[in-house]
Image (cartoon, rainbow, N blue to C red):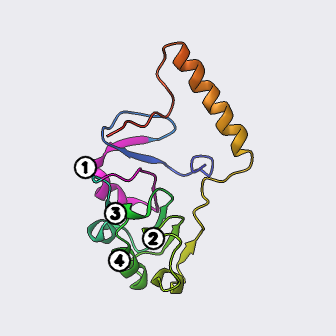
Amino acid sequence: LAKALGLRVIGVARTAAPKPPFDRVVPLADLASIAAEADYLSINVRLTEATRHLIDAALLDAMRPSAFLLNASRGAVVDEAALIRALDERRLAGAYLDVFETEPLPESSPFWRLDNVLITPHCSDRVADWELCHARFFMANLERRLAGQELLNRVAGD
């Protein structure tokens, strides 16, 4: 979607292997330098011990004050206390948050009072025709498995 809007898209992965549709893929070790130049930092990782609080105070401090953080992965990937401070002090322009460490988000959460936060109810995966899309994807992977080919979008286990 970002590419369709004319944005340059840089992926961050454990290894820097080229992968469409990214303009470039850099290793995880470069996350802070990429965050420093990003207008939008979209977090799309699964939660593991290695990714818990991956987005911490130091990384948020590296981001530009005009930048936005988007998290649709898992709440614990972001240090929420550090994010609240950065947003409250306007060291970050804003955040779009679909996931939180505690769900549903408690009424007492400071996120509710911040005017630079857009909160959605853990629904970022809900798109029109998603059932059909998932069914087609499942069938494509089933055909690949039966043909002895590598599966699409495989997530390696721990």
Q: Amino acid at mark 3?
A: Ile
- Residue 150 vs residue 64: left or right? right
Q: Amino acid at mark 4?
A: Ala
Q: CA distance from mark 2 to mark 4?
A: 13 Å
Q: CA distance from mark 3 to mark 2?
A: 17 Å
**In the rendered structure, are the residues bearing label 1 and label 3 in contact, judged by CB atoms less than 8 Å apart?**
no
Q: Earlier in the sequence, mark 2 or mark 4?
A: 4
Q: CA distance from mark 1 to mark 3?
A: 13 Å
Query: Which residues fall within the magenta stretch?
Result: 24-48
Q: Earlier in the sequence, mark 3 or mark 2?
A: 3
Q: Quadrant of the C terminus?
A: top left
Q: Amino acid at mark 2?
A: Thr
Q: Nearer the viewer, mark 1 or mark 3?
A: 3
| Residue 63 occupies quadrant | bottom left
Q: Mark 3 — residue?
A: 55
Look at the image and say whether residue 37 sits in the magenta stretch: yes
Q: CA distance from mark 1 to mark 4?
A: 23 Å
Q: Mark 2 — residue?
A: 102
Label 4 secondary element: helix
Q: In the rendered structure, find residue 29 and report the number of the disc placed on it.
A: 1
Percent of width and height locating residue 25: 38, 41
Q: Nearer the viewer, mark 2 or mark 4?
A: 2
| Residue 141 occupies quadrant | top right
Q: Mark 4 — residue?
A: 81
Mark 2 crowd level (few <14, some 14–19, many ≥20, 10 Å Cα): few
Q: CA distance from mark 3 to mark 4?
A: 11 Å
Q: Nearer the viewer, mark 3 or mark 2?
A: 2
Label 2 secondary element: loop
Q: Residue at x 46, y 62 (%)?
A: 39
Percent of width and height locating residue 80: 38, 73
Q: Earlier in the sequence, mark 3 or mark 4?
A: 3
Q: Earlier in the sequence, mark 1 or mark 3?
A: 1
